[in-house]
Amino acid sequence: MSITPVAATTTGLTATQVQQNRQIDLVDQQRLDDQRTQDRAQEQRLQDQHLEDQRRIDDQQAVRQDLVRQDQRRADDLQQARDDQYRIEQQRLQDDRRLEDQQRIQDQLRLEDQLRQRAEDARLQFERTNDASQRLTTQTNGMFNGRVDVYL
């Protein structure tokens, strides 16, 4: 029993035609292999492009996040500066009030001292006047006493 190719027996092809068909099949197979290789290469390029796009997107997101952090730091710094300025202004106002209070207290103490001194001066003046008045009254009474005797 001899083995004959199936294609040759069923289609009635000659050996040359079978050989040509095999070559065509080999060429087709080569084309399919080349196409698979090209498809794999295309798939690899697409994956590489996707990875590159993803890296680019990740880089852009990282840049955006950095910008957001910088903006947040600037906003925080600005708020801190405003808070510091407000505290400084409040401290200055409080210091001004303290100085005004101290000045008022000093003015009040000076006024009290002046009033005390005036009261003391008035008391001394009153005592001097009272003493002088009593002396004068004593002298005057003595003069009248002696004269009353003269007239009686």
Image (tube, helix red, strand yellow):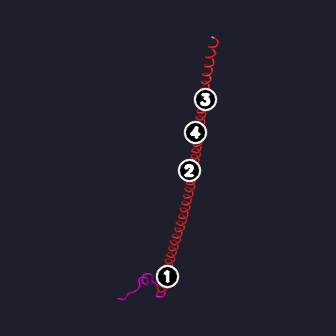
The residue at 52%/72% (across/down) is 46
Q: Is residue 109 above or below residue 3?
A: above
Q: Earlier in the sequence, mark 1 or mark 2?
A: 1
SS of the residue under disc 2: helix
**Left or right of residue 151, residue 31 in this image:** left
Q: Amino acid at mark 2?
A: Arg
Callout 1 environment at 10 Å: few (<14), some (14 to 19), or many (20+)? few
Separation (CA) of disc 2 from disc 4: 32 Å
Q: Earlier in the sequence, mark 3 or mark 2?
A: 2
**Left or right of residue 129, residue 33 in this image:** left
Q: Nearer the viewer, mark 1 or mark 4?
A: 4
**Left or right of residue 131, residue 30 in this image:** left
Q: Nearer the viewer, mark 1 or mark 3?
A: 3
Q: Amino acid at mark 4?
A: Leu
Separation (CA) of disc 3 from disc 4: 28 Å
Residue position for label 2: 87
Q: Earlier in the sequence, mark 3 or mark 4?
A: 4
Q: Nearer the viewer, mark 3 or mark 2?
A: 3
Label pair 1/3, CB-CB below 8 angstroms: no
- Asked whether 68 or 76 is in front, the reply is 76
Separation (CA) of disc 1 from disc 2: 83 Å
Magenta part of the chain: 1-16
Q: Nearer the viewer, mark 2 or mark 4?
A: 4
Label pair 3/4, CB-CB below 8 angstroms: no
Residue position for label 4: 109
The residue at 57%/39% (across/down) is 109
Residue position for label 1: 30
Residue position for label 3: 128
- Asked whether 85 or 63 is in front, the reply is 85
